[in-house]
Amino acid sequence: MAKLSLLATLEGHEERAWFVAWSPDGKLLASCSSDKTVRIWGRKAGGGDSQWLCVAVIEEGASRTVRSCAWSPCGKFLAVVSFDGTTSIWEKVAKGVMLSFELLASLEGHENEVKSVAWSTDGAHVATCGRDKSVWIWEAMDDGDYECVTVLHGHTQDVKMVAWHPSEPMLFSASYDNTIKIWAEDGDDWYCAETLEGHTSSVWSIALEGGGERLASASDDCTVLIWKRFEDAQPSGGRWRRVCKLAGYHARTVYSVAWHARQPLLATGAGDDAIRIFRESEGSSARSDAPSFDLEVTVASAHAGDVNCVAWAVTAAAATAAAAAAAAPHVLLASAGDDCLVKVWQYDAS
Amino acid sequence: MASVFLGDLDDFIAPSQACVNPLFAAPASDKPAAIAGNGADAMELVLEDEFETLAPQVLPPQQQEPDLIKTSASKTATVSLNDCLACSGCVTSAETVLISQQSSGRLLSALRDKSFAVSVASLSPQSRASIADYFGLSPAQAQARIATFLAQLGVTHTIDAACAGDLCLVAARDEFIARARSPLPPVWTAPAPSVAVSRTTQRDAATGAESFNAPQLRGPLPLLVSACPGFVCYVEKTAPEALAYVSAVKSPQAAAGALVKGAAARAWGVAPAAVLHLSVQPCFDRKLEASRLDFVDTVAAEATEAAEAAAAPTADVDIVLSTSELLEMAAQYFRSLAPAPPAPELAPGIPLPPPTPEGAALASADAAGGASGGYAEHVFRHAAKVLHGVDIPQGAPLQYRQGRNVDMRELVLEVGGEVVMRFALAYGFRNIQSILTQLRRRRCAYQYVEVMACPGGCVNGGGQVRPAQETPQAMRERTVRVGGIMQAVPSLAQPDDSPLVQWVLGPGGAMPLDSAASALHTTFHAVPKLEATNSLLARW
């Protein structure tokens, strides 16, 4: 039997924890909260994966809830977005065993709450979205500053989350208007290449599969949908089609979905306080036109309140990590909840 | 104050986010009561448009959107257009629906009722070019056909709004020269929030004190062109710190309004209120602009009974139709290529460009100078000569350098190997953001920026004729094509060469210079900002 075991409960946030993000090397975990701070957590020496320390707190900067954050692919920078309308870029500086974060740039432009931020795989672009229904793409300049590349209008409501394609210049956005939009580059500007319709309520979270051929989306309609890119375009020009629906598992809104980068695993966090792990069925894969997923694990009261975010830990050193995973097939998952807590879990396959 | 749940929107709009206006505007409310209770959980805002019911059957109702404000919200309505302009929050449904107050139906009913002695249409060169492109006509043919069509509806005069644009260019270049000679130090501070009461009066939002609605002529560099209503609306609501940089010169539409309801009405011997002014524009946001109280005389509202009829409350522009709305009305007519009836005669002595016979010249500096009025082009040439003694021959095209993208271009003047002047054309929201960021950080290298909210500029305005589905590539091609048609008119070396400009501003002109100054300048306001603190929003 596969299982998800609690390794550590990280206490420190004073209000609901919204989001967790693993650093690219898997060594650090950043968490954000309504208490206007970002906490950075690291493993205690000799404590393995079960003893964690808060190694830094970003306290200044946000005057309202910090809703989300994202590490740059190089791991040196952290982008932080807040309900106060700002996006700030922080640089990680080592200070002995502790870390400190220095404000590098402030990206102003959103009219109000910024909800999500994502760093493109090449590190050149940062995407943000928010309550003003817009999606912004920023480009890193040589002087450490950021310039607005484009402002994308198209969603008719609040935009909840943005996610980059892992290898192509393609951005996904999920909205309160029940749709997911795919933005692509054309010459020197961006445009909406596709709109994915299928959810019947807010889309809260989206996650690309490691290879970039499939997308998972989590919604207020209590389902998770799997979308796949097809070679042939539909009459509408669209290439992404829904190929699977995970329904009947979640009793409340699904707030978060995470696709493991290398294993056929989906994790979800929901308003029913539970974390669930789905494994792609035997024989099903990114090549399947009708893939299927099996519910493997349900942790019923993972948090004492909504589970706002789940995130798989990924280590950048692929070769050794894959070898290590083959030897000891357990992986780490972090979660953030309305109970102000951040938790670290260990997943073990059967 | 209860929060307002808008019927078809699945979004809560806190009072601070939307419709703040009823809270502070509407002194002795002459507006229809806007908010009607409709059950405990929902309040519906009701729009009553007296003209809507009169709209002829042939015109299907149209969903219209302001260009800058993207929303699909449908049947929700509140208060009036200028209420929306004064609100800092709502960039949502209200403006969308309210725009329908300026409809072709309203135009037709006004013309049918003959409630105006004179009716004038000012046709923007962008609209003309868009229609010319659609039917494969020359600009002059399109101008003539549109004039003839409108004449059949009862519009007595159709004028070329590019000529009003030439007035703006004269005002814009003088403003730049004055500012370049004695600029104020750079600032990033919002002025005290205020709302317009009328052309002459504004009210402080905090104290309620009324004061003269004075155009702000002095300020720091760069000077930002204020002709784009989308940009103006954005700055007033979202970035009022930049207002000090914004030009006080009216847009060509507003200048046409001042001309038609001012000097021209006087020359025709009719009261401004007896003139119906229709404006055909490439842009839905022009409808919002036309509703600004800064362009309305309300002073003599009580005195209308008396001999003061000439001063009856009147807006400079009564109805704005987009190019696509005009096309929808006239498509049938244009296709039939019916022979034009004799053009109506203008009152003698007013060199408003007459209803142009096909093939006649539509000379202007405005239309020939670029996609959006030729501001940078003309002011650069003028300033090079006046400030730096560099005479750029009329035949020599300016060298535009492309910046980060096709919508960011620069004009640089070098004297003795040194850059003495740097202008920019910044089109589209992304480049507006770049300019605002530069201003915020006091790092702007430009002295003058022609700012337009639409990518590609006004020729690509949201109200232009465009296919329902259009790839970005096709859009760029159309923009280039329509821009080419628009500029395929004789250029005036100087806007002063325009007979209209001479009539208005020249010696013994219809608007003596001091009054012309006020007729061609306006005021912008920092819209009162209210923080969104509704607890219902906190969850998100």
Image (cartoon, rainbow, N blue to C red):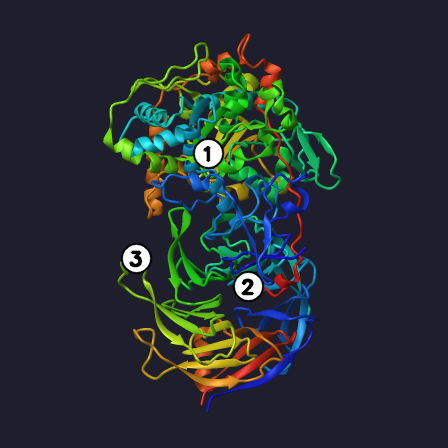
Task: Residue at 39% x, 63% y: name it.
Answer: A197
Q: Residues within 10 Å of mark 3 (few under 14, many from 20)?
A: few
Can marks 3 and 1 be said to lie on one chain?
no
Numbered disc 3: what chain? A
Label 1 vs label 2: CA separation? Answer: 46 Å
Label 3 vs label 1: CA separation? Answer: 34 Å
Task: Residue at 57% x, 63% y: name it.
Answer: A69
| First reached walking from the N terminus: tag 2 or tag 3 | 2
Q: Quadrant of residue B278?
A: top left
- Nearest to viewer (mark 3 / mark 1): 1
Q: Which mark is residue A236?
A: 3
* Residue at far front of view: B305
SS for tag 3? loop
Return the residue nearer the eye: B93 or A216.
Answer: B93
- Nearest to viewer (mark 2 / mark 3): 3
Q: Amino acid at mark 1?
A: Val
The residue that disc 2 covers is A70
Label 2 vs label 3: CA separation? Answer: 34 Å
Can marks 2 and 3 be said to lie on one chain?
yes
Q: Amino acid at mark 3?
A: Ser
Return the residue nearer the eye: B357 or B369.
Answer: B357
Q: Eyeballing the image, is A321 above or below A128?
A: below
SS for tag 1? strand
Q: Eyeballing the image, is B494 above or below A222?
A: above
Q: Which mark is residue B320?
A: 1
SS for tag 2? strand
Asked whether the residues under the numbered discs 2 and 3 touch, taking CB atoms below 8 Å apart as contact, a structural biologist would say no
Task: Residue at 69% x, 38% y: name it.
Answer: B191
Q: Report whether B388 appears left or right of B183.
A: left
Numbered disc 1: what chain? B
Q: Amino acid at mark 2?
A: Ala
Q: Report whether A180 appears left or right of B77.
A: left
